[in-house]
Image: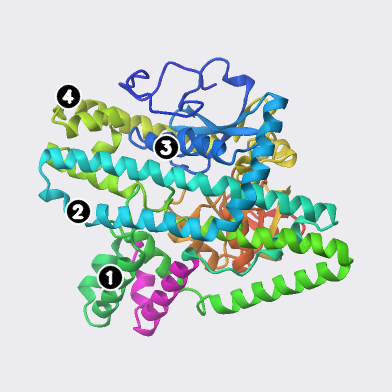
Amino acid sequence: MFVTEEWYPGFDPAANRAPFAVDALRPFEAGDEDRFWLLDFHWPRGLTPLGLVSGEDAFNWGAQVGAEILPLPAGRGIAQRLAGTHPYASAIPVASARERQARELRADRRLPRFVASFRARWRERVEELDTAWDYLAGVALPALAAPELAGYLREARRFHRRALEIHFEMMYPLLVNHLRFAEVCRDLDIGPDEIAKFLLGDDTRIMRTDRALAELSGQARTAGLAPLFAATEPEDLAGALAAAGGAAAGWLARLDDFLHAHGQRTEGSFDVALPSWIEDPTPVLGTVRTLLRMPAEHDFDAARAAALQERGAALDAARTRLGPGRRRAFDVALASVRAANFAWWQDEHNPVIDLRIALPMRWAARELAARAGAQRPDDTTFLFWPELLAVADGAPYRPLAGLVEQRRQYFAHWHRRRPDMPKVLGSADGALDDPILVEVFGLSRGFLDAAAGPAAPEPGPGDLVLRGMAAARGVGRGPARVLTDADGLHRIAPGEILVCESTSPNWTPAFAKIAGCVCDGGGMLSHAAIVGREYGVPTVTACGRATALIRDGDDVVVDGTAGTVAVHRRRAW
């Protein structure tokens, strides 16, 4: 289906081969059908030519290097292939039983040292990234001479790659540590739902941003701005507020303060094509607009208190069932997973890494577009990295201008195709060899069966029941809002059921207003599962084809305890 000579106009595989540790990012080729491939949820819009640096630095470098550091016993990281502009991911297995055993022994020796030093090590990495970020964010690019701008661009790429090295240096050991805790719990007859409760209640940077956003909404309500927000589309709110003056002017000053503290983040993970909230505050304004439709702001303190109470009750119940010897084994494993807690880090790291690291490259690309007289400010994101470097080093941009327009059309074509892209491709052999694909992407035998099901429902009214992973307990009911990317995220209304491929850190503000969440993919350690539990939002993940089988407006009941999604079709399609 996707093995073809056609790709981005002007693409030269030899010129665009980036460094990789084990397996290079490239379009699908003959022979790839013998492996298992999962549609990657990180870039639901697809990747622009410059956006390929995301896949190159994340999975084909960061993950593959990170898998060797611990090392992972059964896998050597993640490979990626491209179907049009959309990446698919596959585990890179360790085929040799002897090598797996040797890697297991090395991991056994290294993991306790990692757990003991994790907090200090993570603080050091954050300090390293913050120092580099403060420098890159503080450079006035228009004032740079051409050679200095070229140097800045290269430094921005090194920052991007280094951040993703750190990402997987932390992520893989944290995952392995969590999986070993889960193994101890299974041996003690403790189920996955209880395991999730043991790790509830830790505050994160993402949650602090959500609380600040809710506070901003409350200030708009107090200032009497709810009618203006309700009557204005999100794209027009900045102009309408500026024109209104008075209380609106005071609120805009608070918005500036909010953006200064939280605005250097994008509506997606490490994608150079996406603007920050500072560059385009529409997502913030749109989210405030919908939060104002709620009778009261989400009570974050109450939600956290409930999570901590649930954690304490679950721990007490588990310890009561266990005898002294079994309780000691449980407490030792729990101490390890609390010291190096993947569920906490999964959201804590995102403002430091995923949501900001592509921005310096974006700033440099836009500055080069301005100097070259490009038609649009983001035209240079439709250049491949070697092409952008050449322009930065003095090559003329004009010969590439025609290719840019053709590539925009190619990108738009594949963006439209995203809802119909197969969730899985190839053979399922080896699909479960990588813990990221299992615990975060949500790979399981149930998911594979669901993903291989019908691509679309039968036309006409009727009821449908989907089954997935019971990720966050409780029952929620409301009209469906189906999103295949984050472009309309800020339009989600209070009480709706969010239906999506999977969520990323930038989706978190929606959890303060939705009644439930349904995802095509995602495991117990996926973003949707973790945030659903922390915010008390019933969530079912790994449903396979929810975005294809549910339509906007369908009446949906999410049972996050049973792992079922009931869809009541009240109208013919």
Up-down relation of residue 18 to residue 469 (above or below): above
The amino acid at mark 4 is Pro
Looking at marks 4 and 3 on the same chain, the residue that comes earlier in the sequence is marked by: 3
Up-down relation of residue 517 to residue 228 (above or below): above
Q: Is residue 522 visible?
A: no
Q: Residue at x 43, y 16 (%)?
A: 5
The residue that mark 4 highlights is 399
Picture disc at residue 139 = 2
Looking at marks 1 and 3 on the same chain, the residue that comes earlier in the sequence is marked by: 3
The residue that mark 1 highlights is 256
Q: Is residue 160 left or right of residue 316?
A: left
The amino acid at mark 1 is Asp
The amino acid at mark 3 is Asp
Q: Is residue 443 left or right of residue 221?
A: right
Q: Is residue 11 visible?
A: yes
**Which residue is at the front of the view, 502 or 566?**
502
Q: Which residues are magenta?
A: 207-234
Looking at marks 1 and 4 on the same chain, the residue that comes earlier in the sequence is marked by: 1
Which element carries disc 2, helix, strand or loop? loop
The residue that mark 3 highlights is 57
Circle 3 crowding by C-alpha within 10 Å: few under 14, some 14–19, many from 20: many
Q: Position of residue 521 (x, y in %)?
A: 62, 45
